[in-house]
């Protein structure tokens, strides 16, 4: 690809690839992105890709966003994952009180982070705000964040759940400074170790009322991205991580195949008909999945710009394309890992850590089979009735 024609975030990511790749072993070992790389990523604006422009973000279109994450993943999957996790969260700042959003995002090196939904987390009404107690898992990149987010169920001062007009429990997203949390050392995993995705907790911590984000209300800050579901943003980012990982695995194998003669083999791998077939199939699997995902993102972006909203069919298509990209990337990666033979199991090979990172990425909820069911229901004329679109 001609880098001169690439969007600015993609060029910024490419410029950081050598430094990220050089730090990859340390990122894995320390389970952290080193401070100098965090600063470089923030200075390049990569943690604010999806933030509204009025809040200092770049409001990056989904295609450019995905390509940026993919480039980062080719250098190190954990770095790409942390950027992908943070980006939809800064996008959420469009729903926050504008003064609060400015407080969180205005500093050049501001980084919000959050974990997964925590149904037991609660916020009890208090003068001027809420007392928040809860624990959230998978706080990817939270150790280097400046602000944390956590979904909570709202309760009145007597401890009874607050109810919306339709009788459902009211929820919000609490925002609080990162030093307020207590970290739980839970991240002992096979892959994506460098994300440092420990759990974090609050115990009866006061959060001002204006720091509670109500995503049921209209956005407070205009953005061309406001009609995109945040979960679809996560899906595109995490799928791009998987695509980037496998692209590097394939490139590495194709290079190794030029000179490696396997045990009991008579020729180098590249002259083996089985290997030739495996490479051809893996290239087709990865290329097709990637093309489908980018086509879905581009179509959705064009529609959103023209209409200021996103139709259900396009949401379904993005969800399906993201899930398909994750699962097909894993299939192609498995083929290459097997073709590489014993070379793939050594820690200093280009495959071992990437294989583990790839399967950690596809263990995430965005890759689950249920998303095929949701899409199938829609195509068969059944209302999928799910928040995942």
Image: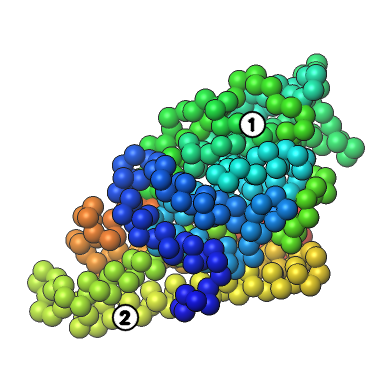
Res. 104 visible in picture: yes
Left or right: 156 with respect to 74? right
User: Relative to the observer, which residue lies in front, 181 or 187?
Assistant: 181
Taking the spot 33% from the left edge, 66% from the top edge, the residue there is 249
* Residue shown at the point (47%, 46%) measured from the top left: 39
Q: CA distance from mark 2 to mark 1?
A: 53 Å
Q: Position of residue 325 (x, y in %)?
A: 51, 66
Q: Is residue 227 left or right of residue 104?
A: right
Q: In the rendered image of this protein, does residue 304 appear above or below residue 155?
A: below
Tag shown at residue 208: none
Residue plotted at (43% across, 63% down):
15
Image x and y of residue 230, in percent: 66, 53
Disc tally is 2
Residue 176's tag is 1
Percent coordinates x, y for residue 84 in the rendering: 54, 53
Which residue is tagged 2?
277
């Amino acid at each position: 690809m001609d880098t001169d024609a690439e969007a600015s975030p993609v060029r910024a990511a490419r410029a950081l690839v050598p430094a990220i790749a050089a730090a990859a072993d340390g990122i894995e070992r320390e389970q952290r992105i080193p401070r100098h790389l965090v600063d470089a990523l923030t200075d390049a604006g990569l943690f604010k890709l999806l933030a509204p422009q009025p809040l200092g973000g770049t409001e990056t279109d989904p295609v450019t966003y995905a390509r940026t994450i993919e480039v980062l993943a080719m250098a190190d999957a954990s770095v790409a994952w942390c950027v992908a996790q943070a980006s939809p969260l800064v996008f959420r700042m469009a729903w926050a009180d504008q003064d609060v959003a400015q407080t969180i995002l205005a500093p050049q090196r501001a980084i919000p982070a959050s974990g997964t939904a925590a149904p037991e987390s609660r916020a009890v009404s208090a003068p001027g705000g809420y007392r928040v107690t809860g624990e959230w898992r998978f706080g990817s990149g939270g150790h280097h964040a400046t602000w944390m987010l956590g979904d909570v169920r709202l309760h009145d001062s007597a401890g009874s759940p607050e109810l919306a007009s339709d009788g459902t429990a009211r929820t919000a997203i609490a925002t609080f400074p990162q030093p307020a949390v207590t970290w739980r050392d839970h991240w002992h995993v096979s892959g994506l170790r460098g994300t440092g995705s420990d759990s974090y907790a609050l115990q009866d911590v006061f959060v001002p009322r204006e720091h509670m984000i109500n995503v049921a209300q209209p956005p407070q800050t205009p953005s061309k991205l406001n009609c995109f579901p945040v979960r679809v943003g996560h899906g595109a980012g995490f799928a791009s991580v998987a695509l980037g990982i496998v692209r590097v695995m394939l490139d590495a194998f194709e290079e190794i195949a030029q000179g490696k003669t396997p045990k009991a083999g008579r020729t180098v791998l590249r002259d083996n008909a089985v290997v030739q077939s495996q490479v051809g199939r893996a290239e087709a699997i990865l290329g097709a999945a990637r093309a489908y995902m980018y086509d879905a993102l581009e179509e959705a972006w064009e529609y959103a710009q023209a209409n200021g909203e996103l139709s259900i069919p396009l949401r379904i298509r993005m969800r399906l394309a993201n899930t398909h990209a994750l699962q097909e990337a894993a299939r192609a990666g498995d083929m290459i890992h097997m073709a590489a033979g014993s070379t793939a199991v050594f820690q200093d090979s280009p495959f071992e850590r990437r294989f583990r990172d790839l399967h950690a990425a596809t263990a995430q909820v965005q890759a689950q089979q249920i998303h095929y069911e949701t899409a199938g229901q829609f195509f068969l004329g059944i209302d999928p009735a799910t928040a995942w679109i």
